[in-house]
Amino acid sequence: MSTPAHVGLLGGGVIGGGWAARFLVNGIDVTVFDPAPETAPRIQRMLDNARRAYGALTLAPLAEPGRLRVTDRVAEAVADADFVQESAPEREDVKRALLAEASRAARPEVVIASSTSGLLPTRLQADCAGPERVVVGHPFNPVYLMPLVEVVGGQHTDPATRDRAAAVYRAVGMHPLIVRREIDAFIADRLMEALWREALHLVDGDIATVDEIDQAVAYGPGLRWSFMGTFLTYRLAGGAAGMRHFLAQFGPALKLPWTHTTAPELTEALIDKIADQSDAQAGHRAIEDWERLRDDCLVAVLQGLRSQDTGAGRTLKDYEALLFDRGQARAVAGDLPPDRPLVLCRLRVRPDWVDYNDHMTESRYLQVFGDASDAFVRYAGFDDAYLKDRGSFFTVETHLRHLAEVSASRTIATATQVLGADTKRVHVFHTMTLDEPGAADHGRVLATAEHMLLHVAVETGRAGPWAEPLASRIAAAAAAHADLPTPEGAGRRISMG
Amino acid sequence: MSTPAHVGLLGGGVIGGGWAARFLVNGIDVTVFDPAPETAPRIQRMLDNARRAYGALTLAPLAEPGRLRVTDRVAEAVADADFVQESAPEREDVKRALLAEASRAARPEVVIASSTSGLLPTRLQADCAGPERVVVGHPFNPVYLMPLVEVVGGQHTDPATRDRAAAVYRAVGMHPLIVRREIDAFIADRLMEALWREALHLVDGDIATVDEIDQAVAYGPGLRWSFMGTFLTYRLAGGAAGMRHFLAQFGPALKLPWTHTTAPELTEALIDKIADQSDAQAGHRAIEDWERLRDDCLVAVLQGLRSQDTGAGRTLKDYEALLFDRGQARAVAGDLPPDRPLVLCRLRVRPDWVDYNDHMTESRYLQVFGDASDAFVRYAGFDDAYLKDRGSFFTVETHLRHLAEVSASRTIATATQVLGADTKRVHVFHTMTLDEPGAADHGRVLATAEHMLLHVAVETGRAGPWAEPLASRIAAAAAAHADLPTPEGAGRRISMG
């Protein structure tokens, strides 16, 4: 039984409510002990947030949510539970009394976990009946989305209890980390607390504001920390020579007044231990492979944040606007002959665009062709000001032909031919080719796309004529292309015939 | 002149080479002073990494890379430069001498920046000619991808120099953070160093290994830090009552032995300062909006990392495998009436699938329709064993019609009608509708897609007949649909007419 049917929760605040949401969204029934009158509606809101987030997180089928009950009696919350999680305020006396009471009401074999951020499990379990099944399971806010949960046993905890708790957490999508030795604040909170106290000094000393400090994290080290911890990051900063080189290079800085935290003495024994553990962690992969993985993860995170227009994602968005402007400046400068199909997009196939066969997936073709249409309209003068004041455009119809496969990291280009235009529509035909001068298959046609684009005026919200400068530039492009031969494959319909 | 034409770099190691790659990939010529013989090939490798990463990062048009030269003379590196960046080893005497020499060889108005991680600019600029144009610009590894650069002036730095340096950094896609007051290690490195020293204590005390510590960051706080710093994170942990409540709740923990860093005294004045600055940072948005943004960013980061099968992304992947198994266990085989279009896909539009207008982007339509084709072939018996031993299929032609917009989080479904089939092809027509019983627009047709799918036999690698059970099941589906009316929009071609 790794997935419990029914979980008893003690406390329904930010953390307890987050647990409720995670269990409920996984189809598990939950009974929450919390005497506060607003508990049920608050948890309902958190469940709504969780369902919204999971709907976005995955296309995998989700269970119907479990059933939520709220009670003001501890015994009622835990009597029928297959697993108990305590999330009371961070006070040892409060948690200890609550865990003791719950341990007498729960079935004797049921695991009882505490969400404490840093109190010692040995002390929390001291008054419990059956302390061997009491353990810390320390989650992070928002509990329904954050994967990490630190699992820490006390002196009386049966090691099997840690494994059983870990199995429950894994069954609801979490990443349990077994903390092997009990210590105040465990691992993550010690690191967070060190950073937090240092940050408080910066504010206290008027060095930086809270916003500046948050920027210093979120545009920098925080991006790397989302997929690599501090040791792997530094191993890569050491270059090919690795962790030992990094420690030789930055070891002396441990003596500098670079933080309020004093470092341990960097003895030969400690250097050996770190270097050996780092080799065990990362030595199976060459530095070049780690660098590529790091870069791919950074790109993925930056693109994810771009979709949210937040933090470093907004920096990327602003940068891309610059790149488009510069590209347009180069195009207008006359690099593009107007009487031939316009080569407006050139890019490499991203490693995460390919399927298990290393072929670019179907929808990425349309994404690239969509970008080619965007690039054409930008070529004709479309920009943010036009979008704001004059109008937008959308694709009403598309015809795609897939002619050859293309694998990751190859360079492709699109050429755009205007097949026709009226005052509010433009009919374009894109040809996608391999674009690697020197390669044997340079110029191979991979796919074609035919699009009908329709202009929508801002003022009316309906289809209407292009405004200037797009009207004349699109007409000019259509005229310049009028004598080009109709490309093979244009105007097709799909049929078995 | 915010984009320099030519940059002089002093030092071409991990950091200097990263700067070279960033400037080169932005079309800027670079001359690097570095006497080490392997400098040029190392920078060339970093440029290759950067070009690979940028190809993945953006579809925006990139400039042709700038020209790289390497020299063993400082004067040659900086004489023609419009901007100078020093990235020598982290030793004050070395940097100071190098900056002094460069300041005599560079044009007097050229900004000279140092990449130091923590040395004070006032000391670094002390021996320079024209110290007013000397400044710190502290980047993060890999420099060609990490947005943050801390800009710190010394006592002799003209404030305009900071702004000019910031403009250069912004022009190559970075996020400059002006550090208003000079302090050892600036802001980000003080925070990183506090965390790093605490981590060293954990290893030193055998509490955790470097890999366990990295997990404690990357599956937990690191995910949040990639878009929100520590203050905003804690403000949200305070719930609706915000920062003041969080400080009241966790202030006492500052006295606990939760880290080796001592905290400043949490006086009323400090509490007021933090709460006021936090309000200035985040008070313009309701807590619920911040929570949604946080959740959306977490989802985006987790999905990005899933594409790299790394860290918390792998946790998500494993969890989804569980969800698919559970969903399959719930599914009732054969509850689909065969003589009607098959409803095989039902999903919610993800928040990161929409554009700035909150409309699902074009390529996502094809992705969903591609999934519908996959689902149809799976319905006909396609599975991993078939893929391995018998054959695969691909889409040779697609016709899409976009009929209505759909916004994030709405539920959509696809219905699939078989228009025809022969021994190796099947012609399908998908209709995408809003699928929210009870909503006023339930059933609205959003788009249609017509696909021709072609079977490819494993043995020959060429088009060939479907094997069993697909051959008979596809034939059966075609027969069951033969008497259905041809859907409106099938068999169209694109034309202006």
Image (tube, coloured by chain):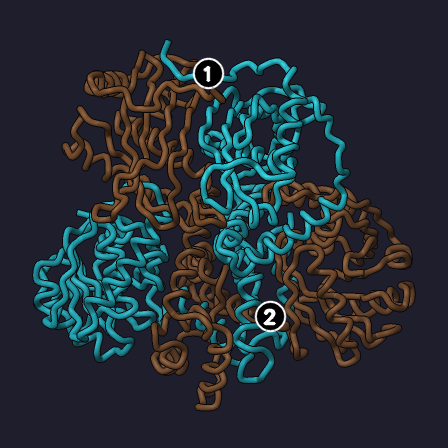
Chain colours: A brown, B cyan
Q: Quadrant of residue B15?
A: bottom left
Name which quarter of the figure residue A384 lies in: top left
Looking at the picture, how far across and down is residue B2, in whole percent?
Answer: 20, 48
Q: Is residue B238 visible?
A: no
Number of marks present in the image shown: 2
Mark 1 residue element: loop
- Kindly identify the residue that appears in the image at 76 percent across and 43 percent down: B330
Identified at 59% across, 42% down, the residue is A56
Q: Position of residue A438 (x, y in %)?
A: 21, 48
Where disc 2 sits, the SS reads helix
- The amino acid at mark 2 is Leu
Task: Indicate whether B133 appears above or below A35.
Answer: below
- Looking at the image, residue A97 sits to the left or right of residue B9; the answer is right
In this view, the residue in front, A339 or B183, is A339
Q: Please state the horizontal and vertical placement of residue B86, each as a whole percent of the image.
A: 22, 67
Q: Chain of mark 2?
A: B
Residue B254 circle label: 2
Q: Give the label on residue B492, or none.
A: 1
Q: Residue at x 63, y 53 (%)?
A: A142
Q: Amino acid at mark 1?
A: Arg
Q: Earlier in the sequence, mark 2 or mark 1?
A: 2
**Residue B418 image position (x, y, % from top left):** 60, 24
Report if residue A430 is visible in the image.
yes
Q: At 41% from the left edge and 14% from the top edge, which residue is drawn?
A: A463
Question: Label 1: how many residues lie within 10 Å, few (<14), some (14-19) or many (20+)?
Answer: some
